[in-house]
Image (tube, rainbow, N blue to C red):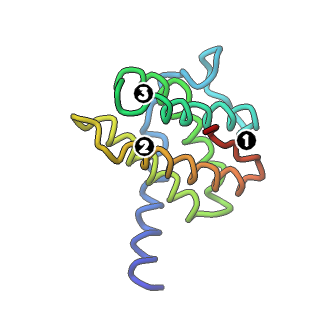
Amino acid sequence: MSICRYVFTLVAALALLALPACSDDGKSSPDGAVPEGPVTQVEADRTVSGLCEMLRIGRRDRDALNDVFFDQSHAGLHRIAADAQSRDRAATGLLLERKQLVENDLLADPIPKTFDEDIDSLVHATSGALRVIDLDAPRCDG
């Protein structure tokens, strides 16, 4: 195994270990409960829809971005990663890496100019992981 592949695998494994450490404040579903079982298409659609909304908002409103990300997409991203991990660790690692990049963007002041690119790459990583778990990968309009 090459050193790059080893490092990537190690980073992905460490990211998976961190899954339970993140809190989504129970805002992942309308009734406040965190869904159990496999990710559904409805949950996948809601997760990606939130990311697409973040693209529409852009860097101009940090509060709105955080609300959308943590209320609509964050928990779904973790659940998609958890479902995909046994089938494709590389897709899972990429999804978690891109999610972390967006989370870091949301903490930066000002939000980096690369934010739109970072969200777009998270949408693509999420779509890849959704295909791994045999769900349709919604697209952002426009």
Residue picked out by circle 2 = 116
Disc 2/disc 1 C-alpha distance (Å): 29 Å
Report x, y in % for residue 33.
62, 20
Determine the secondary structure under disc 3. helix
The image quadrant that residue 132 belongs to is bottom right
Q: Is residue 74 left or right of residue 140?
A: left
Q: Which mark is residue 38?
A: 1
Labels 2 & 3 near each other (Cβ < 8 A): no
- Residue at 61%, 34% in the rendered image: 47
Report x, y in % for residue 104.
32, 42
Q: Label 2 sits on what residue type?
A: Asp
- Residue at 36%, 24% in the rendered image: 61
Q: Quadrant of the C terminus?
A: top right
Report x, y in % for residue 78.
55, 42
Labels 1 & 3 near each other (Cβ < 8 A): no
Closer to the chain start, of discs 2 and 3, is 3
**How busy is the neighbourhood of tag 3: few (under 14 within 10 Å), some, or many (20 plus)?**
many
Determine the secondary structure under disc 2. helix
Instruction: Pick out the residue farthest to the bottom.
Output: 1
Report x, y in % for residue 89.
58, 63
Residue picked out by circle 3 = 65
**How busy is the neighbourhood of tag 2: few (under 14 within 10 Å), some, or many (20 plus)?**
some
- Residue at 48%, 51% in the rendered image: 96
**Is label 2 or label 1 in front?**
2
Q: Which mark is residue 10?
A: none
Closer to the chain start, of discs 2 and 1, is 1
**Is label 2 or label 3 in front?**
2
Disc 1/disc 3 C-alpha distance (Å): 27 Å
Instruction: Pick out the residue farthest to the top.
Output: 31
**How busy is the neighbourhood of tag 1: few (under 14 within 10 Å), some, or many (20 plus)?**
few
